[in-house]
Amino acid sequence: MQTFCVITALQKNSNLQQRVCVSADKPQYRFLAVSFFSLQQFPVYSNILTLASDLGKRLKLPQFPPITETCYYHPNVLCMKYLMEVNLPDELHQWTCFVAKEARMDDVTVLTYNPGLKKKMIPYDIQAVAIIIVVLKLIFLLDDHSEWQLAKRAQRENQGQNDITIFDFERWYMTTRPCMDEARRKLEEENARFPWYSESILSYTRKSRWRLMKRKRMAKNLQGQFSKLAGAAPDAGNPGPSSFVFNWEEPNTGKICFHAHSLEGITQKDKKPLCHLKKKYWLNTVKKCSSNFCKHWKQYDESQFPSSYRFVISLFSTVLRVEPNVIHYEVSLVEEKLFSKIPTRRPVKRLRKRKL
């Protein structure tokens, strides 16, 4: 019996394809449609959350276990993790806890996911990163002026005979920027080497299948030999699994660790700068649209924001491997929750005199 395998796409840009097998020996053709996915790109973060939320609703899952301060997904724990990840001082952790409390983002009822309430899943990692960015904006403003002035002040203080090393934003930028560029380059190389093809070989006859299998084995062998010659053997020096992208305490690398640096002179112990910084703090969006169709406030146009803010967004985007607009959108939501208590002056309506 001779069988022909025909691959037909349902749509031009669709990932879902069909394999149709036609038997020529019988008078009536029997079509066997087997659907399979042809993966051509990495999944989007928002789509993963939406699919997970829909799956929980379909399965009618009960309420998830409560997320307390001892849980890994609590913002206080995640903020500490990402502060260590991007080499920021440990003293910022009390500020992240303060912002999370003021914005009511550490509430157990809010953090715990319940599929029955038809709510979307909370992006815990992106939410923690957004809290850190808001804290950096509260302290350093990230307006391409204030952070560099504070850096010059910290350099003058550190030149004196002080037992405490004050955090220098400029030095942190010069240390973190090359590491971020190197991590992004490795990520691009990893994505380029990813084989976007199916492992199973589709062929018409056994003879053509044997030839294709032989070519595939030869290509793999040549690729392995070239990688050994280039000194990039995949099994050589394989490190253990780790959730951290950067390693700042690695010896003999010339990297400066800022974890123990102090914020003395920049912040106050009683956490009062939040009151007077509200006047200087710049919001990502002036006003949120009330319409569900307008989404201009979610868009992230890099040309409209300072370079320091763009650097921090791109740094966390490299760590989480998500798009920068996803982090920017979450920062806008945190700002909306944090500054919603600020009273705004409403224009006084003048009553018109009625004509008699």
Image (cartoon, rainbow, N blue to C red):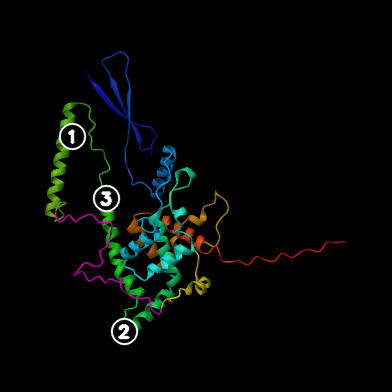
Say which residue appears at 47% left-offset and 56% top-offset: 299
77 versus 158 height, above or below: above
In the rendered image, which quarter contains the C terminus?
bottom right
Instruction: Please tell me whether mark 3 or mark 2 is closer to you in this view.
Output: 2
Q: Is residue 159 magenta?
A: no
Q: Residues within 10 Å of mark 3 (few under 14, many from 20)?
A: few
Q: Residue 25 in the image: state x and y as whole percent.
A: 26, 15
- Viewer-nearest of discs 1 and 2: 2
Q: Which mark is residue 192?
A: 3
Residue 143: tell me if it is visible. no
Q: Amino acid at mark 2?
A: Asn
Left or right of 341? Residue 321 is left
Q: Which residue is mark 1?
A: 212
Label disc, if present, on residue 162 of the rendered structure: 2
**In the rendered structure, which amino acid carries the disc numbered 1?**
Leu
Image coordinates of residue 316 in percent, x first then y, are 36, 60
Bounds of the magenta segment: 236-265
Give the number of callouts: 3
| Picture residue at 32% right of the left edge, 82% below the top | 158
| Residue at point 45%, 46% (across, down) | 114
